[in-house]
Image (spheres, grey):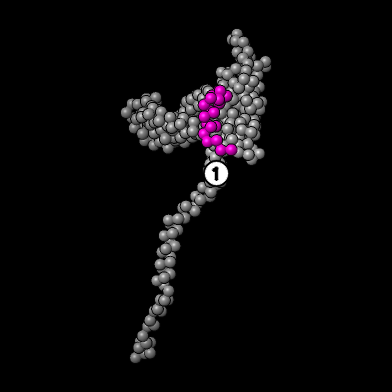
């Protein structure tokens, strides 16, 4: 018998004494990674939001409860700033102006965006990519350039719109001298700038609707209008609610367009014809250093108005789209 046949195979090496501890440690690290690593990934956003979002909001709320100036002196006065808002004619004037411009801009803007999104969603439309890119161009253009161009278009003496009105026998309109005319001019700037942006958001929502629904509806003999009303609008409801709330937030904080339309006049015309809430907040909180606390109260009033109007729009759109 050979030596190799009688030799026993070597026994496996014994596991290290700390192997169970290593396995438990690896299992624990794996559990911790699965449970807490997502929070680490999103932590930078919340840190930035806390520094640049939450803290300024809380600081502004604290300032609104004081008679505060930017030099550093402040006296606690409770809710006196908020009660003063209720009897402030300039505040109510700014509120009316804000809602007026908001109505003239947001409603036509959303209807036009919905129409354009449905048009761009058609499969028979040629050069769809070109039109989808072109419709977003106004949003890329600087708001200062937009204000310069529209300021020339709405000039009283040599503006294009007054010239067109003169062709039908209408007297020249002093666009920045009257409330309704200034609202219309500013709303046209807002509509031109943001319609394409909302169109692309609504188009993305339409692209997510299954095509099988339209094919089945077409087989059943449903017209294009019935397909839009019975399929597109109900399926587009979450996206449309998002666009409405986004437009509401932007409309209630309107600042740049009316400021540039009035050539930097923070009071919005000689008689405050188009001063918005955001402009009034800037006037009280930044321009006038002695009323920073009152300006902070205006800022929180804007925040509460935005919340109420957004909630109202959400309920209205949700009920309408049923």
Magenta highlight on residue 245: no
* Image quadrant occupied by the C terminus: top left
**Residue 20 occupies which quadrant of the picture?**
bottom left
- Residue found at x 39% / y 24%: 225
Q: Nearer the viewer, residue 48 or 144?
A: 48
Which range of residues does the magenta coloring cover? 75-93
Disc 1 designates what residue? 55
> Vertically, is 44 above or below 166?
below
Query: Would you call the spot at circle 1 few (<14 residues within 10 Å), some (14-19), or many (20 or more)?
Result: few
| Side of 112 relative to 292 (left or right) | left
> Vertically, is 211 above or below 275?
below
Residue 288, horizontal then vertical, whole percent: 64, 31
- Residue found at x 55% / y 25%: 88
**Residue 270 occupies which quadrant of the picture?**
top right
| Side of 86 relative to 221 (left or right) | right
Residue 221, horizontal then vertical, whole percent: 33, 26
| Side of 146 relative to 125 (left or right) | right
Residue 252, horizontal then vertical, whole percent: 52, 30
> What number of labels is visible?
1
Q: Main secondary structure of the magenta part?
A: helix
* Image quadrant occupied by the N terminus: bottom left
Q: Nearer the viewer, residue 232 or 58?
A: 58
């Amino acid at each position: 018998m050979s030596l190799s046949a009688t030799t026993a195979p070597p026994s496996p090496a014994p596991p290290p004494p700390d192997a169970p501890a290593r396995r438990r440690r690896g299992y624990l690290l794996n559990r911790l990674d699965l449970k807490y690593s997502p929070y680490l990934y999103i932590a930078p956003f919340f840190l930035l939001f806390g520094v640049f979002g939450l803290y300024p909001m809380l600081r502004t709320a604290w300032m609104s409860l004081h008679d505060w100036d930017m030099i550093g002196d402040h006296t606690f006065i409770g809710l006196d700033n908020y009660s003063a808002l209720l009897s402030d004619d300039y505040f109510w004037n700014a509120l009316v102006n804000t809602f007026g411009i908001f109505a003239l801009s947001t409603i036509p803007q959303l209807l036009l965006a919905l129409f354009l999104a449905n048009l761009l969603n058609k499969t028979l439309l040629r050069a769809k990519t070109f039109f989808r890119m072109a419709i977003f161009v106004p949003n890329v253009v600087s708001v200062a350039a937009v204000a310069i161009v529209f300021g020339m278009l709405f000039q009283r003496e040599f503006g294009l719109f007054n010239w067109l009105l003169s062709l039908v026998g209408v007297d020249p309109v002093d666009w920045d001298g009257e409330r309704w005319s200034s609202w219309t001019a500013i709303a046209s700037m807002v509509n031109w700038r943001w319609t394409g942006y909302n169109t692309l958001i609504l188009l993305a929502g339409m692209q997510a609707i299954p095509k099988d629904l339209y094919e089945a509806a077409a087989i059943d003999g449903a017209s294009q209008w019935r397909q839009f009303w019975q399929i597109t609008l109900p399926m587009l409801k979450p996206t449309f609610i998002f666009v409405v709330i986004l437009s509401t937030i932007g409309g209630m904080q309107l600042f740049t367009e009316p400021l540039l339309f009035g050539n930097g006049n923070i009071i919005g015309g000689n008689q405050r014809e188009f001063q918005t809430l955001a402009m009034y907040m800037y006037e009280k909180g930044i321009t006038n250093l002695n009323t920073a606390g009152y300006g902070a109260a205006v800022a929180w009033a804007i925040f509460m108005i935005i919340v109420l109007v957004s909630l109202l729009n959400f309920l209205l759109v949700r009920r309408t789209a049923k």
